[in-house]
Each structure stands twice: as C-alpha cells, then as structure tokens.
Image: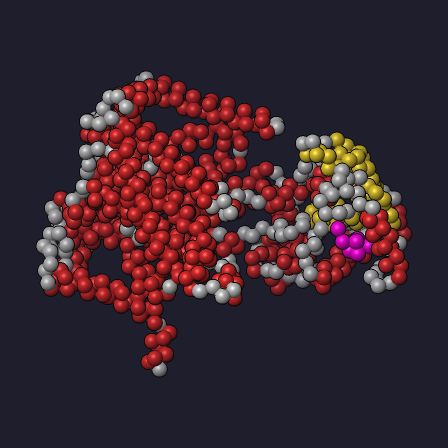
Amino acid sequence: MEIREKENRQVKVKVSHLTKKFGDLLVLNDISFDVEKGDLLCVVGPTGCGKTTFLNSLTKIYDVTSGEILLDGHPADPKKDHIAYIFQGNSTMPWLTVEQNVAFGLDIRHVPKREKQELTDRYLEIVGLTKYRRYYPKQLSASMLQRVSIARAFATEPELLLMDEPYGQLDIELRFKLEDELVRLWEMTGTTVIFITHNIEEAVYLGEHIMVLTNKPTTVKETMRNPLPRPRDIAAPEFVRLRERVTDLIRWW
Amino acid sequence: MMIKFLKKYKYLLISLASVAVVLLVWYLLIDVMKMTKSSVFPGLEKTFRTFIAKLTQKKPDGATLGQHLLESLKVCLLGYSIGAVLGIPLGIAMAWNKWCDWLIRPVFDLIRPVPGLAWTPMFILIFGIGIEAKAMVIFVNSFVACIVNTYTGIRQTDELHLWVGDVFGASSWQKLTKIAIPTALPMIFTGLRTALGGSWMALVAAEMLAASKGLGFMIQQARYISRPDLVIVGMLMIGIVGLVLDIILQKIETMVAKGMNAQ
Amino acid sequence: MNKKQKNITELICAVVSILTFLILWHIGVKGELGRLMPGPLPVIRMFFATLFGGTIGSRTMIIHILYSLIRVMAGYFLGAAVGVVLGLSMGWSRLVEAVFSPLFRIIRPIPPIAWIPISIIWIGLGEDAKIFLIFLASFCYVTLNAWSGAKNVDPDYLRAARMLGAGKRQLLFTIVLPASIPSIFAGLQVALSSCWATVLAAEMVRSSEGLGWIIIAGMNNNDMVQIMTGILAIGLVGMLLSMIFRKVEARLCQWNKSGS
C-alpha cells in the first residue's frame, strides 16, 4: 500500500492545452490535466462530447490541432510506449482465432515465442476463455468478444490502458462481471487506466478519480477523487451520494 | 416406410426425374423417332459412344480427348498463374500506397474494360499461333481480374482494425501483412476464381481462332466436319473441367480463409 | 494535404501516368518493335478518321459499334428477363428448384463461347445465333444470382410479413423480390461484361461487321493499326457500358449501401 502511495505521486500522463478541430468544428477546447501512475481515471461526459476524439488523440490516431500529450515526460508514441486500447464495439480480427487475437499485440511487438505463449495462456485463463481458444470471433457472443479484447490489451502488459465505453453494448449482468474483472486486473497489474463512459454509476464504481467533461466544445468541468473503499457497493449511501454529486455536475449540460 | 422415404427424398427424386425426362425425350426424339439428321443433332447413344471412343482415338482432329484436355490445361494454368503472381501484388500495392494508386490506376483503367479475349488477334499477330499468344491472352485476363479484386479487398480493411494495429505500435508493413491482407483474402480468392473462369473461357475462344490442339480447337474442328456429337462431348468436357477447377479453388479458400466464413 | 490539394495531386498523377504510358509506347515502337506494333498516334488518328467519315470494311466505326451494341442488348435483356424469372422461381419454390436446378447446373459451367460451334451447326451463325450466345451469357449469371438472392432472404422478414397476414403473392412481390435486388444487380453487372466479351468472340468467329469483326479482319490482313483501333473502341464502349450500369444501379438501389 505504501509503495502504491509513493508511485501515485509520479505523473504518468500529462495533457496540456489539448485542442482538436475537425475543419472549423472545435471538438476539444484547451484541455489540461494529469493522470498519476497507477490511477484508474474514469472520464464521464455526454454522448458525442468528443470523448472518443480525446482518446484517439492520445494514441495519435488523430493528430491534435494544438497542445501536448506527454507520457512519462516525453510525447506519447505508440511505437515506443506500451499503450493498449479497448475500443467501443467489437475490434477482434475475424480471421484470427481467440488465441491468435489475444496474442495479436504481442505479435506486433515481436515478443519471443515462449513468452508470448505464456502471456496468452495466462490472460486467456483470467478472462475465462481458455476453453474457446480455437474458436473464431464469429462463433462467440458480444461479451466474449469484449473479453477477447480485454485479454488482448492486458497481455501486452501496457503501462497505459485506454478504454472507450468498452461495456456500452453489454447487458447489465455481464457489465458488472467485466467491471469487477477490470478492477481485479488493474489491482493485480498496477497499470494506469483511463476509462471513458457515459454511465455515471459505472464511473463511480470503477474510478479512483472521476473527470467530468462538458458538452462540445469539450473542456474539463471537474476532476474529483473517489475515496470509496473497494469492493464498492452500489447501494451504499456514500456511493449513492457520490453518484448524485456527479449527476448534478452533469445536469448543467 | 415407403411413403416416408418418398417424402424425405421428394425433391431429390423430382430432380432425378427431371434429368431423366430430358434424356428420355432426347433419346426418343432423336435415337428412336429420328426427328433430325444426326449431322445436326446427335442421338444420346451416339454422343455417349463418341465420348468413349474419343478417349482413345485420335481421329478426326489428331489427338485424343485427354491430349486435348492436357494441352488446354497447360496453356490455361500457365497464363493464369503468371497473371495471378503479378496481379495480386500489384493490386495490393495500388490499394495500399496512394502514389502507386494514383500513378498506375489511370493506365490500368484504360486497359481494364477490354475483355481479355479481344487481345487475341493482336497477340496472334505478334507471337504467332503458338502457345505464347494464347498464354498472353489468358495472362491479361487473369492479371486484370486479380488486380481488381485484390484492390477492392484491401480497400475493405476495417479502419478500427488499423487503429488496433496503430495503438499496439504496428509498422505500416505489419498493418499490411497482419491486417489488410487477411481482410482481403476472401476477395483475393474471389478474384482468383473469377480469373480462372474467365481464363478458361478466353482460352476456349483463343483455341477456336488459332490452335492445333486443345478442347476449343477440337470443337471447332468437329463443327467444320459436322460432327455435333463430338462438339457436345467437347462442350461437356469444357464445362466439367471449369467446374472442377472452381471447386478446387473453393476448397483451398475454405482451408486458407477459415475465420472469415466459419460459422 | 487537404481535400482540394489531394484531388489536384491525384489529377496531376493521372495525367502524368497516361502521358508517360503514351510516350513510352510512342518511343517503344520506334525501333525493332515498330515492325510489329504501331504507335499511339496512327491508332488515335484511325479511330477518329473512321468514327463517322472513313470506313473499315464497308461501314464506319459508329455503325460497327452499333451492330455489336444491338446484339449485346438484345441477348442481354432477353437473358436477364428469363434469368430473373427462373432464378426467383427457383429460389421461391422448392418444386421449381428441384426440376430446373440439375439442368441448370449442367449448363452453367459451359462458357457461352463454347456454344459457338454447336449453335453454328444448329442455327448457322446469323443474328439469331449470336443473340442466342449472348442470351446464354446473360441468362446464366442472372439466374444464379436471382436464385441465391431469393434463397437467402432473411427468414425474419418473411416471418414478419406472414404475421402481418401477407399472402404468398404479396410475400413474393413485397419481400422476396426487393430483397433479392442487390444480388440480382450484381449478377446483371457480371452478365453485362460477360455478354460484351461473348459478342466479340461470336463476331470474331463469324460475321462481317461489328467490333469483333474489326479486330479479326485486322488480324487476317496483318493490319495492326486496325486491330488496335478496334481494341480502343472495345475498351471505350466497355467503359461506357459499365458507367451507365453503375448510374442506373445507384438510381434504383439507393437504399442499398453496397450498391454504391
């Protein structure tokens, strides 16, 4: 615990004056914030407020218009930094088996065969898909596919994990299950996670910190610490109070 | 028991009956009632005899059915494979690299609308009536079909998959080999099959115009000497070989591109 | 690069590319190859000279083109009409399918061009025989696609329509036919290019007019300029046909995204 406290003071991601325009449309307006190492930051904002644009700028899928994103003090570059991204919707490769999908990121990074096999096996086991390793994505359900994506992301042991409404399309029961799974993996690996969602309850349940964004052009409305101990109880009064506070912030949209 | 059997196989039986009726009508009209001269429409029995005889006889066109078949296959597969080997990489390059696309596609678009067999007269004048002219016609056919389909296939690559590659830090080459080409594989196979069908057809046309061997030559010769029985044998042979080639490619496709069509 | 710059660059590339091709061709035939191949200039000159004014054989280029086009259209539409009806019926009724599918399966793999000798024996190679060949080319592709289109209609649509009390006839015309249209159009497109190739082959084998005749007569007279002029015309008409087809398809299948 103490080690974690110490690590927490290290800044993993530093975003300063991030601005992004598509043509004349201003999507992100001068966003600045820090994410500490080992944090689990939940970003909430209304649908279409540029949350995805924000993540995509982080990974250089989009070029930013101005501003800077620093990872450990240098500009973020997926070719050097170990970043992983879990997309909204199914992003598995239909031509690869479950096992090959989980190993995809490791393949890209030329991880030696033995190590690759070990990591793949371990994360297949963790998300409970060992039995399905030889299946193709077409043969799996939506939640299993999302678990493949999660395993694929964690298998690369990323320093920074970005998640873009990964559970938006799943039913409640599966969402709870995968949320718990995420918390477990996060506690186990100490990865820094940025988790985007429009679901306030999900944000309060998962986040160490919660960042509320405004409507377009997007800026940061408020960032708050979430002191609730884990495992959290969504029916507990403190939980409800915090959830309502976040909801209040969002009412102003 | 009998009724159950009939019900279960009702449609299969109807299919069999349908073919049987056609053959029977053919047999009755031509073989029994002699409605037309056998130099116009051959009898069923005669056609069948011709087929058996042609397996071993070289008359009247100088080669057995098997020799004609081998000759056709040889030319077809030669031109076809060269076309595929050159066409697929070029299609990939054009779809993946915008400069390749912008510089090569205009010229390619000029050549593309010309059906492969229209090049036959030109190649015959240049190369004579040997194997080269025919192989070139087949080559053009297969080359164009492979480029078109490969190009379309690569262009279908899902942007999301490329992002996944980007986030893991994939190089452009990795994105091509690990994402775009697997995406395009089914389309590449469609191209290979279209190309093979087109090549086979173009070959028959080329052989009818200029050849001294091959199935197209055989049916054209048989026509000159009014042997419709031999023409029909040749046509059926051409059809069957085309079908077999297509089935072989289909089998290879299901083996190679598994996840794309597994259910 | 923004969009406008990109379009301009692309246009410049296209011009550079085609010019390079023509120049290479022009220079290439200066030497040894020139005895076999004409350069681009004589071909283009001949094309325009014969388009309306001069003649190839006894007709102008435009008349040759019209001959080929009319043959194609006659056989194409005939084959398409029969193909759509037969294909849809095969997809709709198991009985029709059982009767016709084995016969269709026997005929389909035989390329239309391979029918040329037998049709000469049967009906000579006059206009009707040529149209018959083109009919076959169009018929096979259209039937196949209409058939698979009708067979692959989403059963949910049928169930939903039945729940709303649609009769058999209504099902066929309001569900099966529209749902098969994309597949039918795909068939029509392949059929069109196949018909275009078939008419050339038929004209090459026997005829006294049309684009196929131009190139084969060029071969017989050792006239490479005429062959290449013919090829140029074939390519232009082929390009025009597929452009028109795409326009029509886009108009008719606006709801279908893959139609673009």
* Residue A201 highlighted magenta (yes or no): yes
Q: Is residue B98 left or right of residue B67?
A: right
Residue stretch rendered in magenta on the structure: A198-204
> Is residue A78 one of those drawn in magenta?
no
Q: Residue furthest bottom?
A: B1
Rendered position, C46 above or below C69: above
Residue nearest the observer in this picture, B91 or C134 = C134
Residue drawn at the location 47% of the way across and 22% of the way down:
C16
Residue B128 in view (yes/no): no
Q: Nearer the viewer, residue A74 or C115?
A: C115
Residue A57 appears in which quarter of the rendering? Answer: top right
Quadrant for the N terminus of chain C in the image: top right
Magenta segment, prevailing SS (helix, strand or loop): helix
Residue at 36% from the left image edge and 60% from the top image edge:
C90
Please say if C136 is above or below C165. above
Residue B234 visible? The answer is: yes
In-front residue for pair A105/C121: C121
The percent coordinates of residue A91 (x first, y second) are: 62, 50
**Rendering quarter of residue B244:** bottom left
Residue A225 placed where, x, y %?
87, 49
The residue at the point 69 percent across, 31 percent down is A24
Q: How many marks?
A: 0
Q: Position of residue C229 (x, y in %)?
A: 29, 26
Q: How is the image coloured?
A: secondary structure
Residue A208: where, in percent of width, then height?
84, 51
The vertical placement of B180 against C96, above or below, is above
From what the image shows, is residue B59 above or below residue A229? above
